[in-house]
Amino acid sequence: MSGLQCLATENIWFDKHNYDEAEKRFYEGANGPATHQQQSSSHGGGDQELVSRMKSLELENQTLHKVVKEMRAAVQKLESRVAVLEKSPAPAAVHCAKAAPVQAAPVKQVKVTNDADDDDIDLFGSDEEDEEAERLKQERLEAYAAKKAKKPAVIAKSSILLDVKPWDDETDMAKLEECVRSVHMDGLLWGASKLVPVGYGIKKLQINCVVEDDKVGTDILEEEITKFEDYVQSVDVAAFNKI
């Protein structure tokens, strides 16, 4: 077998790495500049974003430093004011002290005799002063009670308007009014009256009176007037007013 035939049947490629290296250089030469530009662009965009974030953080840090500084100044001012208030007296207390000066309480005089006996020394004052004050108080109370007793008491009075109804249209209304006015009581005073038509020719007597509340009531008035049963059918209170 010749040498050419031997090479044709050989399975080992001794120069493969040389061909691989040449192929790698070829592709790097063809695509290298574009790939390098893309990597530069990607690296440049990432750097710009990082710079923006760093600037933002620095600005935020400066703002926080400013706020903290202002808060420290405010706290220092408050502490100074509290210290001043704690050292100075309260204004209300000073005002009260100026407005109401303290007066010394009266001191009872101690009466001492020249005798050697201890029973003659009055260390706590005499009971005669208390008795005199009690007597004056009692006299004033009695004078007030006497003055109040002389003052005339206010008498409560009321004005009452009564409706006195007859049995029918044939009832003598003049006689009916005479009967009503014949009722006499302590604390009762009759006033004006008039006849008011009711219907079907019937008229009722409307009469006014003034009564003392403690002596005369509406119930007893109605009872006394209805005793004249020949003329009076019923009695109603039309109006009641305090005077």
Image (cartoon, grey):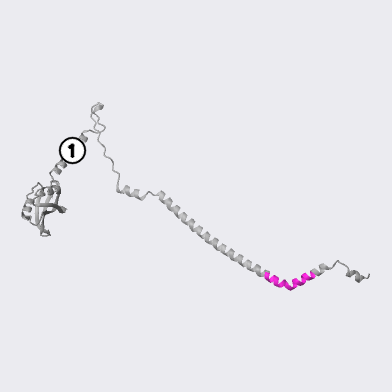
Identify the residue at image location x=34%, y=50%: 92
Asked which secondary structure carries label 1, the reply is: helix
As rendered, which of 6 and 89 lies closer to the eye?
Answer: 6
Q: Position of residue 173 (x, y in %)?
A: 7, 55
- Can residue 80 be seen in this snapshot? yes
Q: Is residue 223 above or below residue 65?
A: above
Q: Is residue 201 left or right of residue 88?
A: left
Q: Is residue 100 left or right of residue 37?
A: left
Identify the residue at image location x=52%, y=61%: 63
As rendered, which of 231 and 149 lies closer to the eye?
Answer: 231
Q: Position of residue 83 (x, y in %)?
A: 43, 50
Q: Amino acid at mark 1?
A: Gln
Magenta stretch: give its range. Answer: 21-38
Residue tagged 1: 138
Identify the residue at image location x=18%, y=40%: 141
Q: Is residue 58 above or below residue 139?
A: below
Q: Is residue 222 above or below residue 143?
A: below
Q: In the picture, residue 137 is in which quadrant?
A: top left
Q: Position of residue 191 (x, y in %)?
A: 9, 54
Query: The N terminus is located in which quarter?
Result: bottom right
Extreme-right residue of the structure: 1
Q: Is residue 76 above or below residue 18?
A: above
Q: Is residue 171 left or right of residue 57?
A: left
- Can residue 154 be seen in this snapshot? no
Q: Is residue 223 left or right of residue 105?
A: left
Q: Position of residue 231 (x, y in %)?
A: 8, 52
Q: In the picture, residue 53 is in which quadrant?
A: bottom right
As rendered, which of 225 and 90 lies closer to the eye?
Answer: 225
Identify the residue at image location x=70%, y=70%: 35
